[in-house]
Amino acid sequence: MNISRFPRLKFAHLPTPLEPLENLSKLLGGPQIFIKRDDCTGLATGGNKTRKLEFLMGEAFQKNADTIITQGATQSNHVRQTAAISARMGLSCEIILEHRTKSEDPEYLENGNVLLNRLFGASIKTVQAGSNMDAALLESAEEIKKKGGTPYIIPGGGSNPTGALGYVNCAMELVGQINDSGLKVDHLVTATGSAGTQAGLLSGLEGTRSGIPVLGICVGVGKKAQEEKVFDLVQRTNEFLEISGSVNRDSVVANGDYVGSGYGKPTEEMIEAVQLMACEEGILLDPVYSGKGMAGLIDLIRKKHFIKGDNVVFLHTGGSVALFAYRDILTA
Ligand SMILES: *Cc1c(COP(=O)(O)O)cnc(C)c1O
């Protein structure tokens, strides 16, 4: 697999560490758990969107864009990382935030990622839950063009084939790390939302014939809808990479049991996972993605889904800034 032919700007701190979670593994008494620290990608408190943005911003740069437009939920980590890299590149950044969770908590509305978006000087527009966000992006791009600007649109979560290249790259990085260290990896577990992370990982892990299966823990929609979303993007990513036909539908696996009442809505299991990781490992998860992802992993370990001798890697996708938007439920 060759991704060097795609435009890319290198600003992520890579490779991210792969570390054992000794205390949590011992406490749960199941497989050995390892963590791939994509919360440490370095851009404005890090997270998984940074890898995608290396390729997306590479394309924006190639197209001489002067304004980056993107969208996400109010506490989007993707939007925060996009605002940060836009600031660093001297580009304007226009953000459209969807009030998806309908929370009226002022911490949710103004703290966490929203506070950072403002610090990075992005211009922010907020729209109702359920708005047509793709249409809003196009509308915003038209307005910029009318004023003589050159917009570049990044879809929600940076999840298109260009963004997914960031996780093709992560898959290759991980395979390199485990080959170097002699670690046998039986499963890779990650939170899955806009699908670029899981799609890129699948494309990269299958493209390298690594034999490592990926389990996505859903954070928004249910199993079937999420698997379809990931499968669609992995096919488009493979076409983009010109490696046709190597991912089969059966390898796209998501678990929808840990979403709770919806995207960004807290669950008891998420709160337990955030607290356990903090107290046992000194590692910060987040309430929307990695907390629910880890809640899924913990529950599956308790249900003996994995074999005792297995080595399981949890991809930490970041997001801890959103903890400050959920102060009420985490300190209750
Ligand atoms: C966006 C995000 C995810 C989900 O990644 P997708 O590529 O959108 O599926 C997981 N964790 C965090 C912290 C995120 O911000």
Image (cartoon, rainbow, N blue to C red):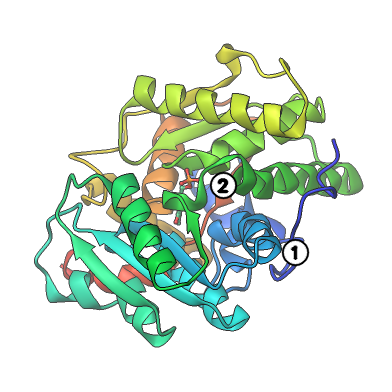
The circle on residue 25 is 2
The residue to which callout 1 is attached is 14
Q: Is mark 1 within 8 Å of ligand 1?
A: no
Residue 293, position as x, y percentages in the image: 43, 44
Residue 209 figure quarter: top right
Nearest the viewer among 330 and 222 is 222
Residue 43 figure quarter: bottom right
Q: Which residue, as the protein is rendered here, is positioned at the far left?
A: 104
Q: Is mark 2 within 8 Å of ligand 1?
A: no
Residue drawn at x 71%, y 62% as measured from the top left: 62
Disc with the residue nearer the chain's start (1 vs 2): 1
Residue drawn at x 74%, y 19% as measured from the top left: 244
Residue drawn at x 41%, y 42% as measured from the top left: 193
Residue 176, position as x, y percentages in the image: 85, 46
Task: Look at the picture and state if 79 lies above or below 267.
Answer: below
| Amino acid on which disc 1 is placed | Leu
Nearest the viewer among 107 and 159 is 159
